[in-house]
Each structure stands twice: as structure tokens, then as C-alpha cells.
Image: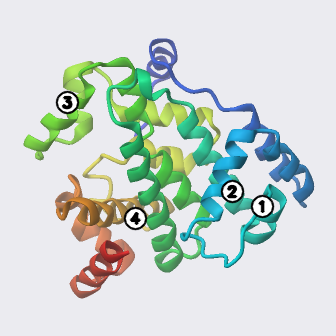
Amino acid sequence: MLNVDQSVLDDIGRGFSVPAQPKLLLELLTLMADANPDIHAISRAISKDIAVSATILKTINSPLYGLGRTITDIKMSVNYIGIFGVVRLVTGSLLKKSFDPKNCSIDLEDFWQLTSDIANVAMSLGQRYKPDIANDRFFSLGLFHACGVPVMAMKYNDYQQLLDNALTTPELALTELEEKHYGVNHATIGYYVASSWRLPKDVCQIILQHRDRHFISRLDGSQEQDLFAVLKLSEYLVSMKYSDCPSADWSYVQENVCKVLAIDEDALHSLASEFTAS
């Protein structure tokens, strides 16, 4: 398991504009820690943030959820998709709100669309192939796995150029290029963000190692490798959907991802057809 020296994390905290965990999310996590979470208290807490509430209602009333009726308030949202479903939406909304697109060197709208798609695919795959793992872990991992990218793009004006250069050197992981150019990488920064937002430890660990092409070279049956495998397959399927080519790390991890998820070549082709058509 890869560990990060505390001094490195301290340097990140001082040198980067890292979003702090919002008070609303902390309040929700506190409420949800109760043995019997109070739906009314959770709904009231969310409703206090007008922008987040509007985003949630817009999302829930979209074709993605297909609820068949218009949801008009947060309490109805909680009743329809559950506490964890609403908190997932709140977390995504708060994360996106934490970054100012005017001070960022990448297109944040495209970035969040990509990570949201990966999060949704990861939830679907997790439910299908690893139902014993809480589904919110797959969502959190998909949404936060690359959250260090916008942090770096806020600091470095040439970050988009580095991303473009990465396309011409697929033999190097993006984190390797970042280390060479900046002396730090987005996975370490993402680990810092996820830890400070109090995401589960196993999710934080995979965020730290999500670009490690050797992470599942030796299979050990761990939940961390399950999470990693679902994330990598999700990245692959979303990449095939948008660019008709595999994600950067896929060729290095494909064999063992398929072993972890018990997927053969035919099943992989079926998944690609299913998710690229959706």
C-alpha cells in the first residue's frame, strides 16, 4: 500500500487552493452517523443551501432518474431516492461549486461531465459485479478520483498543455508527467482533498493510487482492488463512449481488471456496446 508522507500533505495544504470540506456536508455526515437518520433534519439542512437544492431538483427531474412525476422539494427527493442518493448529489454539487472556472486553466464543465459519467457508470458496475460493497463508495470514487486535476489547473496556467502532451506519451502515466514537470501529482492532491472531506479510507487510498498501473499486478482479493477494477473499467467505458478509444491506463490493467470482475472478452464487448449506446 502506498503511503504519503505528512510533510508532503502539509506542503499541498500550504501551496494549493484546496477546497475545504463544506459545512453543509459535515452537517449531513453528522446527521447520517445516527443509527436512525432523521429525514426531516437532513432535508432542512440541504434546503438551507438554495444553489445546491436547485441543482438537486434539476438532476432528480432529469430523464436520468425517470421518476414519472415532478419533484418539487428536497424532502420529496429524499423520499424518492433515499438519504444516500440525495447526499451523493449534494456531495457532487458541493465539489463542483468549490472551484472557480474563471481561475482554472482547464474546461471545468467538460471535466465535471466526465467525472460524473464515470461515477454513474461505476455505481452501475459496482451494483452488478460487486454488490457486497456499499454502492456509495463507487460513486464517491468515480466523482473524486481525479479531483486533484482542477486543483492543479487552478495553480498552473500550462496544465492543459501538459494534459495535451500526455496524449502523445501514453507509455507514461499522467502522474509521472506531473511529477517531472511540477514535482507533485494530481493523485496525491486528490488524496488530500478526499481525506479532508472525510471520504472512506479505502476510497481515499484508491484515489491516491488510481493511476498506478501496477496496483493489481498481483491479485489479493482485497476490497481496494475491487474498487480499483470497477473504476478502471468505468474509465474505459466512458472513454470509448466519448472518444471511441480506450482510456490511457487500460492496456496496462485490462487483463487483471477482467479477472477481478470475472469478465471475459465477450462480456467486455457487450459492456462497451451497452454503455456507449446509453
Q: Nearer the viewer, mark 4 or mark 1?
A: 1
Measured along the vertical axis of the image, is residue 9 above or below residue 76? above
Crowdedness near tag 4: few (<14), some (14–19) or many (≥20) residues, C-alpha within 10 Å = few
Q: Nearer the viewer, mark 3 or mark 4?
A: 3
Q: Position of residue 229 (x, y in %)?
A: 37, 64
Residue under pointer 2 = 57
**Which of the two labelled residues, at mark 4 and mark 1, occupies the earlier sequence position?**
1
Element type at marker 4? loop
Q: Position of residue 94 (x, y in %)?
A: 62, 39
Type of residue at label 1? Thr
The answer for how far apart the CA atoms under marks 3 and 4 are is 34 Å
Q: Nearer the viewer, residue 278 or 222?
A: 278
Examine the image and state in which quarter residue 264 appears: bottom left
Marks 4 and 1 close (CB-CB < 8 Å): no
Q: Position of residue 25 (x, y in %)?
A: 72, 40
Element type at marker 1? loop
The answer for how far apart the CA atoms under marks 4 and 2 are is 42 Å
Residue under pointer 3 = 162
Measured along the vertical axis of the image, is residue 78 above or below residue 93? below
Q: Nearer the viewer, residue 64 or 146?
A: 64
Residue under pointer 4 = 220
Type of residue at label 2? Leu
Element type at marker 2? helix
